[in-house]
Image: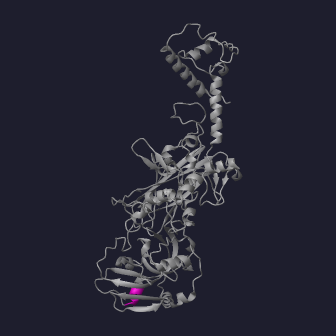
Amino acid sequence: MRLNKKAIIVATCAACTLGLAAGCAPQQSENAGAAAPSGDGGAVPQEQKLTPEQQAVIDGAEGTTNEDIDENYYPGKEYLDNLWDRWDQVATEYAPEVRTLPNGQMVQRTPTEYEVNPDAWQIQAGSNSYNTYWLDADNRGCESCHADMNSLLKHLPYEHPVAWNDELDNKTTLQQCLFCHSYAPGYIAKQYEFGTLMHAVHYGSRTKSDFVNQYQGDCMSCHNATENGAGLELWDLTKYDRLWGINDIENVQGDFKIDQEKTQDQSGVFSYDWMHAYYDNMRHGAGVNGLNLEMPQSLFDEWTITVDGNVNAEYTATLPELIKEAEADGAVITKTSKMVCNWNPVGGGGVTNTEITGIPVSWLVEKAGGYKDGTTGVKALRADGSSKRAFPVDKVDSDEALLVYKIGGEYLDATRGYPCTNWVEGVDAQINSKQIDTYHVTDEDIDYTDKWAGNPNGWQNEDDVPMNKPNATILGVPDGLLVQNGQPYEFTGYVDGYDEKIASVEFSLDRGETWTKYDIGDMDRNKMVWWSFTYKPELEGAYCLTVRATTESGMTSFETQTVMFNAKDKMPNPEDTTVLESASLIPPKVAAASDEKSE
């Protein structure tokens, strides 16, 4: 039993409170309780003698302290000891779960309460296990069952568009799910809205039995109920404001760096595999998320490109012929370029910075005799007819539009659109039509900023406010990641403003109360901004890192991403944690414990 002066002080307050209450109680005779026998007939313990100074402390005499008192003389000490020991036992039994993920990372999703929260007014022990014993936080939120949401999406029975990016190591969370399954007119039908879908998935006739019985799931597994009018909140969106034990650091300081030349090879170039049409399904099935087949050389050799429409000399030529002629003409461009989906959520993996090799569309149009008067832009047409997106003529004139046939120095694979794809910088990635076979120069009056034309930059909510412009994302940090206390840890991620330059990046370690700003300086808006922020925790416990960005025009992140990490003085041995061989779906801790007891 540890000595705890806080417990002594609180007991003093309690004794005073009881004394006040006794003053209002019916009076008994002076000797009524003095010689009363104990309830079991045993002898009454002899009262220990106290010095006047000790008695003064107990009586609360003004100016006295408890430093000289022997706590063994203190009335009720044994009772307080038992309280303390009981909650020590509870803290051990309900210690936050530490998991070792299949990739070797260790996570603790619930903060450790190293001491009773200073805002608590009842201090009966070192911890009351508020997070785990009372809130049951280890068994709440999506990742209590689905330890890796990327793995969950990969293993769904009905294939989900490829929202993960293994090379970037973005961590799919509820925040990203809501980005798509809330307001997405024309992209996702209303029937796929999040609440409707998730309640049916977990409480439908096929799944309710497993959810309730096997995984002990209920409403509180996903929600937080309040009395303040907010109703049923989603636990994962509010948990950092509810949990105890998170260290808040004002004006966090660290080492900040950026890099625009870091590139991904072809395997890291994202492809949502949207499956718009039958040929999208064919590409998906043959690509890395399907059978990962090697594509036939004949498809490349026989592929044709047509340039027609509002030009002076329409033509059709094979792709190899065009490459050979463009190379001889010195027209082929190889450069680092980014690709970003306008629907990429904060925390998402729909971004790419890679080396592309291709033929400028301006050279292809020049080969067709140049534009006719009135030209407004170019339509990029897929061979299967599934895309008719367009880009304005200024993208052609600035050589931001290319017919790409190599990524990372390698010919395209099926997922990336073998044998060639359109590529336009500074607009939505969906203009990068795979297996393009026609550039149709047009004089139509097209709104090139419309999402159906293919040139939006960012996604707007119901109030027409950009939700992901600028986008500031943290990569590679699962919820509750364990790091070594007292040692620098490098956090990494990206910031992007689509068609705007990023002006600054800001970090907060006190949940948005204060921000530390780093100016970017001049940068190329057609390349990704990768950032790193190295921070050395000096206090054991949980922290929440939040990042946001500002564009050159002054736009600030509408949505921010927050990750929690835990700094440990002593890192646990993996074998002493819950080791996961698969992170797709696991029983919650409470279910696993029940299974162990039944064996």
Q: If the image is split into quadrants, where does the N terminus sit? A: top right
Q: Is residue 365 magenta?
A: yes
What percent of the width, then of the height, locates residue 514? 45, 46
Q: Is residue 308 visible?
A: yes
Find residue 294 and report its horizontal and vertical position in percent. Answer: 59, 81
Front residue of 190 and 173: 190
User: Up-down: is 71 above or below 320?
Assistant: above
> Can you give x and y, in whole percent of width and height, for residue 36 in the image?
63, 11
Q: Quick check: is 260 in the magenta stretch? A: no
| Residue located at (61% from left, 59% from top) | 583
Q: Main secondary structure of the magenta part?
A: helix
- 210, 328: nearer the viewer: 210
Whether residue 520 is visible, yes or no, is no
Q: Is residue 360 left or right of residue 589?
A: left
Residue 409, percent across and down? 56, 78
Residue 194 lies, with reference to residue 454, above or below; the image says: above
Q: Which residue range is magenta in the image? A: 364-368
Above-or-below relation of 75 to 590: above
Q: Which of the two residues, 378 or 115, is positioned nearer the viewer here? A: 115
Total numbered circles:
0
| Residue 22 horizontal side relative to residue 74, left or right | left
Q: Quadrant of residue 428?
A: bottom left
The one of 280 and 531 positioned closer to us in this rendering = 280
| Residue ID at (61%, 56%) | 586
Residue shown at 37% from the left, 78% from the top: 390
For the point 38% across and 72% down, which residue is it?
A: 455
